[in-house]
């Protein structure tokens, strides 16, 4: 049997919260969380033109891909769950400009400078459980010169609504029971071992500084924090 390269938190998304269950998690979200999800997508769409090739990291069952595909020339999605991707093939069957791959963002199997825009929204630094520096550096590698990388996390201003959403998911059996003693300060802990963290403005600022990036941090809708990176390769191809 082939040994998995995923850590236990990656396997949680691959084997526990996937496809129909993941879709259900979004369906039960409160109006405020629905607004947050919609505003994230709107923010990303502002960066896309009809000539762009776009990569979404952690595409799940295709919730965001369909909106990207309506504006971009070509959209590529990757995910670590084959079940997600199988579901996405049916969910996205009407879109001919979408391509999906079973792949981890830890090591992207794409040539350098393949995409005009690389996005990871809805808190990927937490959900992927990949070293942030590795995630950003791989994203930069596959983004074209003068392209952009957009990575988001939660704003602290939506903490109460976010926690309520996770509690509701737990009640529906979509995730484990919430450990309220350990859940605080932007971190949600489940008793089955899963932990959802947050990447703050300060965390993004440190990342920008240490990697010497041309980037800005933007708060959207008092609900999400985006790190918007303008990619500048010293050599056109590297």
Image: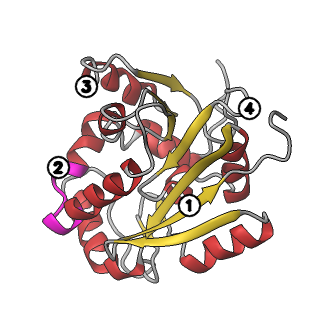
Classify mark 2: residues with Cα within 10 Å, few (<14), some (14-19) or many (20+). few
Question: Up-down: is 49 above or below 37?
Answer: above
Q: Are marks 1 and 3 in contact (CB under 8 Å)?
A: no
In front here: 1 or 46?
46
**Separation of marks 3 and 4 at Cα, in angstroms:** 29 Å
**Separation of marks 2 and 4 at Cα, in angstroms:** 37 Å
**Separation of marks 1 and 4 at Cα, in angstroms:** 19 Å
Residue at image mark 3: 91
Residue span colored magenta:
26-33
In reply to whether residue 29 is colored magenta, the answer given is yes
x then y, percent, for residue 165: 25, 65
Residue at image mark 4: 112
**Separation of marks 2 and 1 at Cα, in angstroms:** 28 Å
Q: Which numbered dot is residue 10? A: none
**Quarter of the image that includes the C terminus:** top right
Q: Residue at x 64, y 65 (%)?
A: 215
> Which numbered disc, 1 or 4, marks the residue that appears first in the sequence?
4
Tell me the element at label 3.
helix
x then y, percent, for residue 207: 70, 68
> Which numbered disc, 3 or 4, marks the residue that appears first in the sequence?
3
Q: Which numbered dot is residue 228? A: 1
């Amino acid at each position: 049997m082939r040994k998995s390269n995923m850590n236990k938190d990656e396997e949680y998304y691959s084997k526990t919260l996937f496809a129909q269950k993941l879709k259900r998690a979004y369906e039960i979200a409160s109006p405020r969380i629905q607004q947050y999800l919609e505003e994230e997508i709107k923010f990303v769409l502002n960066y896309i033109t009809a000539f762009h090739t776009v990569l979404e990291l952690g595409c799940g069952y295709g919730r965001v891909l369909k909106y990207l595909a309506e504006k971009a020339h070509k959209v590529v999605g990757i995910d670590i769950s084959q079940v997600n991707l199988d579901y996405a093939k049916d969910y996205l069957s009407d879109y001919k400009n979408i391509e999906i791959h079973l792949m981890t963002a830890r090591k992207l199997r794409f040539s350098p400078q393949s995409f005009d825009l690389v996005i990871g929204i809805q808190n990927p630094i937490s959900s992927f459980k990949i070293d942030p520096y590795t995630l950003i550096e791989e994203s930069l590698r596959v983004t074209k010169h003068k392209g952009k990388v957009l990575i988001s996390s939660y704003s602290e201003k939506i903490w109460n609504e976010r926690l309520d959403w996770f509690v509701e998911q737990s009640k529906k059996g979509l995730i484990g029971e919430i450990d309220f003693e350990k859940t605080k300060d932007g971190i949600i802990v489940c008793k089955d071992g899963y932990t959802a963290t947050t990447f703050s403005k300060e965390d993004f600022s440190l990342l920008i500084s240490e990697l010497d990036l041309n980037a800005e941090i933007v708060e959207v809708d008092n609900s999400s924090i985006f790190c918007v990176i303008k990619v500048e390769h010293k050599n056109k191809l590297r």
